[in-house]
């Protein structure tokens, strides 16, 4: 089983916050942190940061969201688009062994404006 | 066994479809020894109806009132028709795809014994693919078990299900229900792609061909019933529709005994109208 999710979310009018990630094709509602299905791996195929400047921080949890550790940080230094793709070499950033693994993405920006957005291309797979 | 299926996984006209019963039964041989064996239904597909369009894409057959069980605690509720709540799986009765205008409007695959000449072959693919999928045959009966029937597994457990889809044959007279599970914390809005064959079928009436099919010498598509216990609802349903609940599977070196048995099954038990 391989499933590509296109998780996307806007910033809100706050200087910091957690993205409410959603895939409009498959999610009925977004979530602040996504819990992996048991036995699956999450692979990052790419990301897009767009809008005004902000920093995005991805964190992972192994205890159903009680504690998180930082896994990646991306910086949109100026207004515009920051696009990165890992074609053919996606990065496994989280593997579900207990069914309690989660990831979330937070933002930080200098002004309280809702003018930016993040999009993550993430593969959820139970294969290598 | 050989390839008799098309690119969509459906059996081509003229091919054989075997539905294998994995529940091993026992009997005594003429010497009084206990012999274990399995049975299988052997169908010849004469034709396929609506062969130009055998896909049906629709939402999950859930509503705001569909009962769900939780992987954690509490009673999950779907926020909208078609959704699958977070950390939830369907109730013990499962769910079925309704379809107005059909024999049973609550279950599009359910037909009675008068449909002995038709057989559905259903390949269900669910997106996102990390939705757990199971099939209960008969409905409301969890047949997923481990170490014979020692331990119950299945959709509500760590194993005993598949991610993203399933393939099965719903027989006339036998209720079947789906189970769906979502262990993520997001309420999902899944899509279900149903690839189905409405086969015009009959039970193979030539004992030699039955033997060749069941020993792999004649190509056939084999599907195993999703069961671990041979519920009476299944055996009685097969008997009402076909007069038989299958041919005994013999070893390849027992051709004579097998064909005698098959001839007896065909002439004494199978309804003549079901034979081809």
Image (cartoon, rainbow, N blue to C red):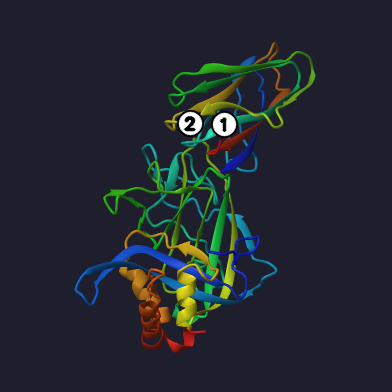
* Circle 1/circle 2 CB separation < 8 Å: yes
Q: Chain of mark 1?
A: A
**Callout 2 crowding tier (Cα within 10 Å): few <14, some 14–19, many ≥20:** some
Q: Position of residue A49 (x, y in %)?
A: 72, 23
Q: Is residue B202 left or right of residue A91?
A: left
Closer to us: A104 or B113: B113
Q: Position of residue B140 (x, y in %)?
A: 37, 59
Q: Position of residue B211 (x, y in %)?
A: 45, 75
Identify the residue position indicated by label 1 in the image: A42
Residue B130 badge: none
Q: Are marks 1 and 2 on the same chain?
A: yes
Q: Position of residue B148 (x, y in %)?
A: 29, 54
Q: Is B241 above or below relative to B229?
A: below
Q: CA distance from mark 1 to mark 2?
A: 8 Å
The structure residue drawn at horizontal position 47% and vertical position 76%, both measured from the top left corner, is: B210
The structure residue drawn at horizontal position 61% and vertical position 25%, both measured from the top left corner, is: A19
Whether residue B134 is visible to the viewer of this picture, yes or no, is yes
Closer to us: B190 or A16: B190
Identify the residue position indicated by label 2 in the image: A96
Whether residue B171 is visible to the viewer of this picture, yes or no, is no
Point out the residue furthest to the right here: A80
Q: Is residue B29 left or right of residue A47?
A: left
Closer to us: B257 or B36: B257
Point out the residue furthest to the left here: B32
């Amino acid at each position: 089983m391989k499933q590509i999710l296109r998780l996307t979310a806007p910033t809100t009018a706050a200087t910091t916050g957690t993205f409410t990630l959603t895939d409009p094709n498959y999610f009925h509602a977004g979530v602040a942190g996504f819990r992996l299905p048991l036995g699956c791996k999450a692979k990052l195929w790419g990301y897009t940061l767009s809008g005004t400047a902000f920093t995005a921080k991805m964190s992972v949890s192994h205890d159903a969201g009680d504690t998180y550790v930082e896994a990646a940080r991306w910086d949109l230094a100026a207004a515009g688009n920051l696009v990165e793709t890992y074609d053919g070499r996606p990065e496994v950033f989280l593997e579900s062994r207990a069914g309690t693994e989660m990831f979330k993405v937070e933002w930080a920006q200098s002004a309280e404006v809702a003018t930016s957005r993040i999009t993550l291309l993430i593969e959820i797979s139970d294969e290598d | 066994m050989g390839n008799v299926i098309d690119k969509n996984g459906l059996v081509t006209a003229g091919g054989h479809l075997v539905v294998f019963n994995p529940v091993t039964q026992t009997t005594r041989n003429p010497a009084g020894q206990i012999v274990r064996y399995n049975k299988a239904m052997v169908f010849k597909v004469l034709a396929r109806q609506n062969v130009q369009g055998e896909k049906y894409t629709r939402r999950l057959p859930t509503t705001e009132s569909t009962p769900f069980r939780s992987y954690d605690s509490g009673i999950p509720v779907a926020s909208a028709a078609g959704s699958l709540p977070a950390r939830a799986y369907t109730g013990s009765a499962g769910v079925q795809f309704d379809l107005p205008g059909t024999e049973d409007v609550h279950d599009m695959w359910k037909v009675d014994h008068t449909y002995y000449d038709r057989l559905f072959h259903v390949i269900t693919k669910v997106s996102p693919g990390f939705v757990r999928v199971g099939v209960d045959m008969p409905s409301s009966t969890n047949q997923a078990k481990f170490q014979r029937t020692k331990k119950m597994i299945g959709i509500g457990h760590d194993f005993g299900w598949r991610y993203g889809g399933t393939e099965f044959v719903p027989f006339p007279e036998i209720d079947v229900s789906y189970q769906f599970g979502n262990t993520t914390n997001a309420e999902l809005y899944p899509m279900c792609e149903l690839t189905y064959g409405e086969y015009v079928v009959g039970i193979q009436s030539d004992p030699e061909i039955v033997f060749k099919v069941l020993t792999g010498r004649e190509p056939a598509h084999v599907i195993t019933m999703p069961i671990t216990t041979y519920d009476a609802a299944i055996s009685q349903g097969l008997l009402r529709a076909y007069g038989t609940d299958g041919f005994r599977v013999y070893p390849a070196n027992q051709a004579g005994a097998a064909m005698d048995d098959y001839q007896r099954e065909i002439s004494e038990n199978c309804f003549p109208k079901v034979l081809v």
